[in-house]
Amino acid sequence: MSLFDWFADRRKLNSIGQKQQEREIAEGLWTKCESCGVLTYTKDLAANHMVCPECGHHGRIFSDERIQQLIDAGTWQALNRQLRPTDPLGFCDRKAYRDRLSDYQQKTQLNDAVQTGFGDLDGLPIALGVMDFRFMGGSMGSVVGETLTRLIEQGTAAERPVIIVCASGGARMQEGMLSLMQMAKISGALQRHRQAQLLYIPILTHPTTGGVTASFAMLGDIILAEPKATIGFAGRRVIEQTLRQKLPEDFQSAEDLLSHGFVDAIVPRPQLKGLLGQLIRLHHPSLKRTHHQVPQGQESDAVALEISGSNEPS
């Protein structure tokens, strides 16, 4: 056997050993941090709201997990689930917009890029909207705008604080001007909510950009953000090409916006629910704690997911 053949056999044996070792580790049992590379037991990571215990990196989560983390078990009542997007402009690029919508609906089991509803947060009744980045990058089309507008109006009528978790690439280009109109429509509903002396808190997560940033994401009475979240209007590359200069590394980060007064506080995800409860009590001291149960006959509209007492993703 030549020296070359010996090394080839050793490499083959090592490769087989690595594959056998990988098979012994159950799929999904461990999660590797995108930032520091540390492996964490997935259940422990879920219990910590998908925040790395080693470096504090906030892993991306979606609307179902957000609702589980913020809303008390058994109190979620979904609203506006009957709204579904269409293709008003007959938009077709590489693939027809109508086909894209169908693909994303099947993949995410959502009608569009937002879930809304009523629920209790630490026993306090709130109206909650949660954008979902899985659905076309959380882009805001007509249905997203209408869904959030109705949520705000329903929250105003019920005298509930409104909380919106923002995660979006901006207005949806496939709907053109109809998409841009949602910025003004949601802003108008928020103004009426404010005139009723009710609280509105947006939570800016990674990423919050474009028309969402230019409208309801920045209209809160108190604006909260998650650590390291990207928040801005135009993209970094567009700004650099326009200015013809290199931007700082932390440009458009939550920390940068906090230092310039655009954000009121950066809140780690595990602390978010507790802080929101404190803010609601400070601004609405007369708001009573409830033990809300979904009325009989509304179970079909009540929950898109089972909310358990744990923080494990469904």
Image (spheres, rainbow, N blue to C red):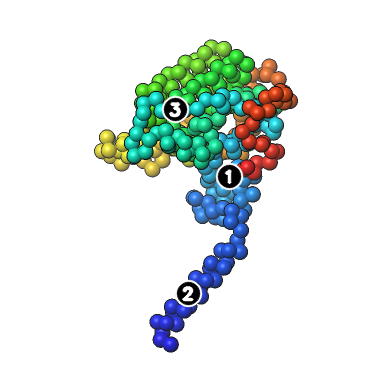
Position above or below: 74 against 56: above
The circle drawn on residue 12 is: 2
Q: Earlier in the sequence, mark 1 or mark 3?
A: 1
The circle drawn on residue 178 is: none
On screen, residue 45 versus residue 34, left or right, reads right
On screen, residue 79 versus residue 213, left or right, reads right
Rendering coords of residue 131 (x, y %): 51, 32
- Residue 223 visible to an observer of this rendering: no
Task: Residue under label 1, please give it.
Answer: 50
The local crowd at label 3, few if under 14, some if 14 to 19, many if 20 or more residues have their Cα within 10 Å, is some
Judged from the image, the secondary structure of the residue bearing numbered disc 1 is loop
Rendering coords of residue 262 (x, y %): 45, 28
Rendering coords of residue 93 (x, y %): 33, 36
Q: Earlier in the sequence, mark 3 or mark 2?
A: 2
Residue farthest to the top?
195
The CA distance from mark 1 to mark 3 is 34 Å
Dots 2 and 1: beta carbons under 8 Å?
no
- Residue 37 visible to an observer of this rendering: yes
